Amino acid sequence: MRKKLVAGNWKMYGSLNENKQLLDGIITGLNGLCNTHTAVCVPYPYLSSVQNALQDTQIAWGAQNVSQYEKGAYTGEVSVSMLNDFKCDYVIVGHSERRAIFGEDNNIVAEKYVKIQEAGMIPILCVGETLEQRESGITEQIIKEQLAAVIKRAGIISLSKAIIAYEPVWAIGTGKTASPEQAQDVHAFIRKGIADQDMGVAKELTILYGGSVKPNNASELFKMPDIDGGLIGGASLVASDFVAICRAMNI
Ligand code: PGA
C-alpha cells in the first residue's frame, strides 16, 4: 500500500503566536486520525518551536527549502545538517515559487534533492507546468524534463525515498484547482513514466496533488487512483480547513 500524506506548506506566513494556535487546532482536530500521515513544512526560524510542539504527536514537520551546499560562506543559506538538528522528516524542493522567483533551475533542484536524501530526509519534489505551457500543449514535456533532471542526477531508485508533488503553477494560490480528471491524467503520466524505468518504484511512489486544495474539493481529488494526498498552501494556515483535508484523505 502506498503511503498517503497530507503536507502543509506554510510559505512565508506565521508568527510564534499564530503558529501555536494553528498547531493546537490541528493537534486537537486530528486526534485519533492515524491512517494518513500528516506533516507541516514551516519557515526556518520556527523549526525549533514546531519541533517542540509536535514531537509527541503523530504529525511530522519539515522545511520548505534548503541549500545545495554543505557549509561555508553562503550568507543567508541553511544546510541539510542544520535541518537535521531539528529532526525534520521532509524538505520541499523545487516548489514553483523557488523556481520562478528565486531562479532555481532543474539542476539546482536536483542538487538539493540529492543533499536532502544524503542527510536522511525525504524530499517532496514539486513539478508542474505554467498556464502558458499547458495552453501550448507541453505539460507532459515540462514535467518529464523536471523529473529527468533529478533521475539523471540521483537515479530512479532514489524515488523510493522521495515524494513527488504535482502542482500546476496556474492552480497555486489562485483558487483555480485542477479538476480531479486533469490532476489524475498528470499523476498517471508521472507514474507511467517512472514505471517504464522501474515498476516497483512507481507502484510505491507517493504522488501528491497541490494547488488550491480546499475542504470542498479535497475528497474528489483524493478519490483518484494515482493521487496519494496533497501539498496544501493557503488551507494549511487554517486549522479547521487543514484538518478537514486530512480527514478527506483518510476516507
Ligand atoms: P495553495 O498552495 O494550496 O495555496 O494553492 C499550494 C502550494 O503552493 O504548495
Image (cartoon, rainbow, N blue to C red):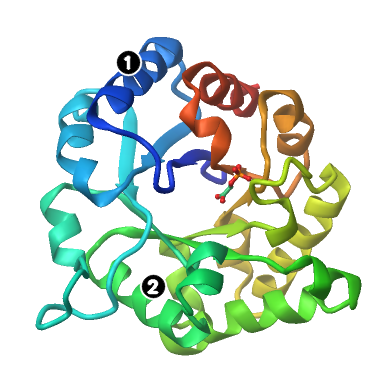
| Residue lying at 31% horizontally and 27% vertically, measured from the top left | 19
The residue under the point 76% across, 45% down is: 225
Q: Position of residue 66 (x, y in %)?
A: 30, 66
* Residue 15 - label: none
Left/right of residue 232 with respect to residue 51 in the rendered view: right
Q: Quadrant of residue 84?
A: bottom left
Viewer-nearest of labels 1 and 2? 1
Q: Give the labeled residue for mark 2.
A: 113
Kind of residue sitting beneath label 2:
Tyr
| Inter-mark Cα distance, 1 to 2 | 31 Å
Q: Position of residue 165 (x, y in %)?
A: 58, 56
Q: Residues within 10 Å of mark 2 (few under 14, many from 20)?
A: many
Asked if residue 166 lies left or right of residue 188, the reply is left
Marker disc for residue 24: 1
x then y, percent, for residue 91: 36, 57
Q: Position of residue 237 (x, y in %)?
A: 47, 30
Q: Quadrant of the N terminus?
A: top right
Q: Amino acid at mark 1?
A: Asp
> What residue appears at the point 19 percent right and 68 percent down from the top-left corner?
79
- Classify mark 2: helix, strand or loop: helix
Residue 31 left/right relative to 179: left
